[in-house]
């Protein structure tokens, strides 16, 4: 069994404050790239609809048949419309839109050559292609809203205790050796140490694939260590997801079983720790008041039995 806990560095300012400027610059760059792509789409559609220059076409047909030029014109028109669509995704800094735009722009440049030796349009395609490649970093950041992964790397310390898959143990040992200021691994079983670590951390990570019940999230709630869990099994039953609007909840929850989901949810917890400390304090108090004792379970079972008995017999239990 492996337990992971997390602490936030109190000596640093909010990562969201530090990263507030670069998303604005990235957004401006993305808008510029999207505008250039949109203009190339308009140019490509217009060029496909207009007849090619006769002199250039005569030179081209010495190398290629007329059918190739006609097909290239049709392809260019379709790709021009696609570029207009992709410009919207680029404006929103979608990584997939960037990948598609790079491929489409390259094909558009080739189609301009084949359909009529349109050197000007092909040059414009090359310029947009180079612009897309030069700004690729702005679109890779789209999967990291608000710099949450940046916050995880710079503002979080992780402690892991336990044993498990040998490959995972080797990776965690490597991480401990190379990033000891941010990550430490105790690759052995030590129940007392595990409880002390869990009690002393700010957050407890439990990104389970499946979890029929789960005990550690209940331990962390009692310690006031807010759990970060995946929405599955007993974790859903015992952890109430945080609501930013009201401050309600006892932890932070994500659904997708994906590293980005975990990193973004950790970033969500870190931003709450920095920007809404009153919510964190209230959540800790609420978490420590949770009752998962056998006394409560027995009362719930008794009430369930009495309701079932009354529904079945038509009257309450006489005893």
Image (tube, grey):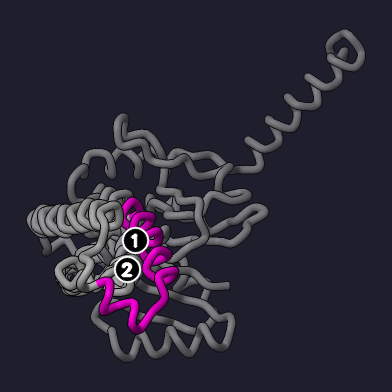
From the top left corner, tell me how far across and down residue 213 is, in percent: 64, 52
Quadrant of res 300: top right
Pick the front one: 95 or 291: 95
Pick the front one: 207 or 248: 207
Pick the front one: 67 or 172: 67
Magenta region, residue range: 57-82
Q: Which mark is residue 76?
A: 1
Quarter containing the C terminus: top right
Q: Which mark is residue 311?
A: none
Q: Which mark is residue 115?
A: 2
Quarter containing the N terminus: bottom right
Disc 1 residue crowd, few under 14, some 14–19, many 20+, Cα 10 Å: many
Quadrant of res 248: top left
From the top left corner, tell me how far across and down residue 143 is, in percent: 32, 60
Secondary structure mostly seen in magenta is: helix
Q: Is residue 232 magenta?
A: no
From the top left corner, tell me how far across and down residue 211 is, in percent: 63, 57
Between the C-alphas of marks 1 and 2, the distance is 8 Å
Name the residue rendered at 59%, 82% in the picture. 165
Name the residue rendered at 45%, 73% in the picture. 193
């Amino acid at each position: 069994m492996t337990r992971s806990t997390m602490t936030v560095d109190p000596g640093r300012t909010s990562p969201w404050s530090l990263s507030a400027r670069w998303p604005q610059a990235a957004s401006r760059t993305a808008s510029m790239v999207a505008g250039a792509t949109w203009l190339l789409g308009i140019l490509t559609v217009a060029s496909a609809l207009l007849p090619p220059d006769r002199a250039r076409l005569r030179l081209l047909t010495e190398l290629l048949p007329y059918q190739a030029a006609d097909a290239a014109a049709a392809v260019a028109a379709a790709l021009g419309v696609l570029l207009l669509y992709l410009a919207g995704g680029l404006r929103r800094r979608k990584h997939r839109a960037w990948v598609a735009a790079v491929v489409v722009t390259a094909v558009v440049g080739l189609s301009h050559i084949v359909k009529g030796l349109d050197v000007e349009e092909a040059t414009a395609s090359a310029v947009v292609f180079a612009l897309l490649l030069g700004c690729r970093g702005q679109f890779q950041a789209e999967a990291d809203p608000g710099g949450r992964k940046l916050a995880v790397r710079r503002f979080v310390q992780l402690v892991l205790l336990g044993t498990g898959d040998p490959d995972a143990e080797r990776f965690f040992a490597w991480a401990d050796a190379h990033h000891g200021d941010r990550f430490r691994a105790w690759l052995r079983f030590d129940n007392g140490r595990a409880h002390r670590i869990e009690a002393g951390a700010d957050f407890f990570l439990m990104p389970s694939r499946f979890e029929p019940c789960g005990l550690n999230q209940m331990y962390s709630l009692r310690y006031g260590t807010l759990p970060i869990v995946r929405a599955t099994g007993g974790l859903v039953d015992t952890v109430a997801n945080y609501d930013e609007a009201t401050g309600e909840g006892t932890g932070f929850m994500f659904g997708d079983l994906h590293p980005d989901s975990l990193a973004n949810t950790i970033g969500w917890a870190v931003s709450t720790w920095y920007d809404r400390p009153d919510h964190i304090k209230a959540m800790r108090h609420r978490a420590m008041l949770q009752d998962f004792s056998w006394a409560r379970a027995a009362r719930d079972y008794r009430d369930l039995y009495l309701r079932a008995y009354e529904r079945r017999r038509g009257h309450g239990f006489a005893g």
